[in-house]
Image (cartoon, helix red, strand yellow):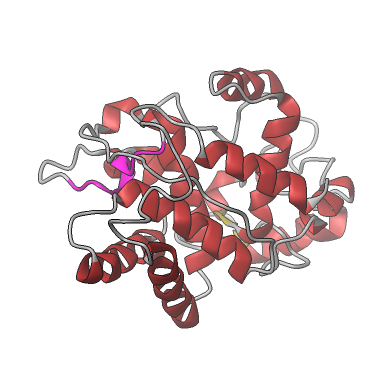
Amino acid sequence: MERGYIVLLMVLIIATGRGEGQLVENFYSSSCPNVEEIVSQAVSTKFSQTFTTIPATLRLFFHDCFVTGCDASTMVSSPNGDAEKDAPDNLSLAGDGFDTVVKAKQAVDAVCPKVVSCADILALAARDVVVLAGGPSFNVELGRRDGMVSKASLVKGNLPEPEFTLSQLNAMFAKHNLSQIDMIALSGAHTLGFSHCNRFAKRLYSFSSSSPVDPSLNADYAQQLMSACPKDVDPSIAIDMDPETPRTFDNVYYQNLVSGKGIVHFR
């Protein structure tokens, strides 16, 4: 799977979503002509502080787009704890992703107050972190409107779960007009991500009655995972999903899957 195809699918995701007007590359050419440079600088500054900026921002963008469209509704906070970010499936979103968007929004508003939407800033930041990880750049069409609704109840059933079968994954992505090949391509973003131990512990300790360890896992890799994720491990412990090149945007993730070194399990 070529990394360029993954980027192409990211462009498709970035260009989709409900609640948006017509998207164009030069949407802010008059109102905030330097928005892309401002966001890029803010993202680079955040990245210089922690690498987690990259996977956290990418995952935040995906979780935002797959619920109510790419409208930054995942950024909304609720005093009642019932916004999208409060849903169980979103509690593991790393704070560095949110902070990246907040810092970029502050930088943009210092030059162009109340002009650029958080939704557009998140889309630009997602592109910028791919570049920072060694991936190719691409143009981002702009003009998204920020969502006015953010409810935790809307999240369940709209994000992939670790136990999903291939049929369930295909059905979920089909709702967004994405094919199985598109879904597999987008999963390549996990080359930069990490997973908490409890999300794949079943594959190590209780896969089936005949085999506690998932036999599709490379035996040495399974031992590495069990060393890093013993039973009853701290739920905050996380493991790189690409054990070979976890900080580079490349296609080694797919090579790992073929070698039985993948945390994600397609059934």
Q: Quadrant of the C terminus?
A: top right
- Expressed as whole percent of the image width and height from the top left, the position of residue 73 reads 29, 40
Residue at screen point 62% across, 20% down: 168
- The overriding secondary structure of the stretch rendered in magenta is loop
- The residue most toward the left is 79
Residue 264 shows in this picture: no
Q: Is residue 73 left or right of residue 169?
A: left
Whether 73 is drawn above or below 175: the answer is below
Q: Quadrant of the N terminus?
A: top right
Q: Nearer the viewer, residue 172 or 15?
A: 15
Residue 193 shows in this picture: yes
Q: Nearer the viewer, residue 203 or 94?
A: 94
Magenta region, residue range: 70-77
Q: Is residue 72 magenta?
A: yes
Q: Nearer the viewer, residue 136 or 1?
A: 136
Q: Nearer the viewer, residue 5 or 73?
A: 5
Marker count (numbered): 0
- Expressed as whole percent of the image width and height from the top left, the position of residue 246 reads 69, 66
Residue at screen point 62% across, 55% down: 138
Q: Is residue 196 magenta?
A: no
Q: Is residue 218 left or right of residue 231?
A: right
- Expressed as whole percent of the image width and height from the top left, the position of residue 243 reads 74, 64
Residue at screen point 36% across, 31% down: 21
Q: Quadrant of residue 178?
A: top right
- Expressed as whole percent of the image width and height from the top left, the position of residue 19 reads 33, 28
- The residue most toward the front is 30
Q: Quadrant of residue 129?
A: bottom right
Q: Is residue 90 left or right of residue 249?
A: left
- The residue most toward the right is 259
